[in-house]
């Protein structure tokens, strides 16, 4: 059961752009023949979409901002590909207010289709590339492979050039939301740590699931802010994942050198085996969720002991 | 206050596509240098995304499916551009279970970025084109123009060629959801009437807000199914809108000739003036919502008299 005061969304960040001097042209519409299309005019681009779910009686002091991974959207936090409840449902049942981001170019944030604004073209991720990067090939993995279509359907194109825009947009999101905790996955894990570095006065806790692109340094004082990086199974079996885990270790050390309280959690060390990169979709996604909530909850509970 | 049993999402429709024979190439990633990208492989494309909000205690016999307009996503039903509660919030407060569609290419459904699959390129809608098509130029209009940026930010590119894919995907959505009512806006208004034609045994009521692309005929027996087309103000002042209203009238006549119970409702005839195409975002969006709910509610109420 979920009792909300309010759900809705807002757009944040981005910029206005003006197109001039283009020649209008005819386009074919599938429903009604052709019409003239004039590309000249004013557009708002490079913002982020944020859908929010505000508890009627939140059980935590601050809300949680969810940041998706590369080639994905906020839909990744909803039902798993095989139709089980996603982490969004579990978070709401736990009494947490949640902000779900679709970052620049992804999902409802929309992408920029104007000529000559972004320097590159979007790339699509094949099922085969996904299976390789997400560690679906290891014996004993827990991704529900029979439901690969559900993951494939929610995988969207990504532009290689937009990370800086996404980092700025997430900082804009945090500034708009105010005091909060952050939970990011993969590319989004790097982005939440980057946002925590830039908006540290607003971030009460920061969690990344198998992050990519984490900062190597944190200037100034993190004032005891707790942070967590979570890894699944088979990390040591993959050169790609060993390298990312090493980056994570360095970022954790930098966070702590700046006065924060960061730690790394490997699920196999808790006896939880078989988790792939898509740990929020794996067949034991509820169990992984519980590990994350057990860490995060006490650090942002409304009735926690204040230090 | 909103009390939900469940929220989440699923993907429906679409097809698998295989890319072969392409040469991998290097791409530049903004975060981590370059990497090889291999476009060969398997992809799932042309599905729709459906986010659902299921009431703990629904007050209606069937849920409502919301279908966005062209160049927009399901976000259009959430907060208005000037930050007031959107129709999604109002529907949920009214005790209705709701399915919000992002159709093929839009929002979280994602688009197909593979070469040579879709025949055209996406078009962006400028603020100037929006203002003209949406009737923001008339004296006394009620769009919150000071918040144009909020509408611009949620406007996304559209492909002119995808209407047939979107029609099929919406039929797939209705088939998956089961018995339901439909509410579509603009392009989505044409799509909901098209879906009602193809899946009539599942559609209990059909509402379109200023629809575009409505069917000119309905084969077979609509068995008394109620339908409504709603128009705002300034319709007669615009050649474009007069034409669309004429299409609507013809479609209503065809619906009724097939045994249905369709009607047209012009808000000015109720004394409600100033509504633009974006009536769910206009400053009196709550009032327009009430008109729609007053029509729809009794037709799908859980405790209604059965005919």
Image: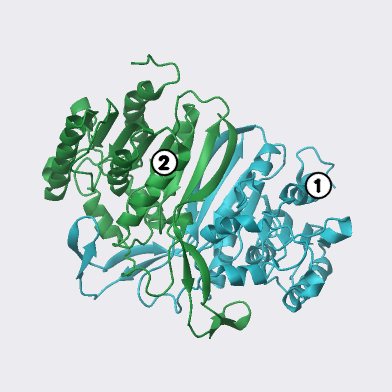
Chain colours: A green, B cyan
Q: Nearer the viewer, residue B248 or A166?
A: A166
Q: Is residue B162 visible?
A: yes
Sort mark 2 into few (<14), some (14-19) or many (20+) by Cα contacts within 10 Å: many
Identify which residue is drawn at 40% across, 59% down: A105
x, y percentage for residue B292? Answer: 77, 51
| Residue, far front | A220
Q: Residue at x 25, y 35 (%)?
A: A230
Locate residue B143: give its quadrant. Answer: bottom right
Does any portion of residue B202 appear in the rendered image? Answer: no
**Residue drawn at (62%, 50%), measured in percent from left and top?**
B80
Q: Is residue B207 left or right of residue A241?
A: right
Asked which secondary structure carries label 2, the reply is helix
Q: Nearer the viewer, mark 1 or mark 2?
A: 2
- Per the rendering, the mark at residue A174 is 2
Instruction: Give the distance between the C-alpha atoms of the residues marked 1 and 2, in whole angstroms.
Output: 39 Å
For the residue pair B126 and A292, the one nearer the viewer reads as: B126
Q: Which residue is mark 1?
A: B294
Chain letter, disc 2 residue: A
Q: Residue at x 76, y 52 (%)?
A: B288
């Amino acid at each position: 059961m979920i009792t909300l005061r309010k759900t809705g969304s807002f757009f944040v960040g981005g910029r206005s752009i003006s197109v001039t001097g283009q020649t209008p042209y005819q386009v074919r519409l599938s429903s009604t023949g052709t019409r003239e299309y004039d590309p000249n005019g004013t557009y708002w681009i490079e913002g982020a979409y944020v859908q929010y779910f505000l508890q009627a009686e939140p059980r935590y002091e601050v809300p949680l901002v969810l940041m998706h991974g590369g080639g994905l959207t906020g839909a990744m936090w909803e039902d798993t590909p095989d139709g089980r409840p996603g982490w969004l449902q579990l978070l709401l049942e736990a009494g947490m207010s949640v902000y779900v981001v679709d970052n620049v170019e992804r999902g409802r944030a929309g992408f920029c289709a104007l000529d000559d604004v972004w320097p590159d073209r979007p790339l699509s991720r094949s099922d085969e590339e996904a299976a390789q990067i997400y560690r679906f090939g290891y014996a004993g993995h827990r991704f529900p492979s029979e439901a690969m279509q559900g993951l494939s359907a929610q995988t969207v194109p990504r532009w290689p050039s937009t990370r800086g825009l996404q980092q700025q947009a997430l900082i804009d999101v945090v500034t708009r939301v105010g005091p909060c905790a952050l939970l990011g996955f993969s590319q989004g894990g790097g982005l939440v740590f980057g946002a925590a570095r830039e908006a540290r006065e607003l971030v009460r806790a920061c969690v990344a699931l198998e992050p990519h692109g984490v900062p190597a340094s944190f200037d100034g004082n993190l004032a005891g802010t707790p942070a967590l990086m979570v890894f699944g199974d088979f990390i040591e079996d993959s050169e790609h994942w060993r390298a990312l885990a090493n980056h994570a270790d360095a970022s954790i050390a930098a966070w702590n050198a700046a006065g924060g309280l960061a730690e790394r959690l490997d699920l196999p060390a808790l006896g939880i085996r078989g988790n792939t990169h898509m740990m929020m979709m794996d067949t034991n996604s509820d169990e992984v969720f519980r590990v994350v909530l057990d860490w995060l909850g006490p650090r942002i509970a409304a009735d926690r002991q204040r230090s």
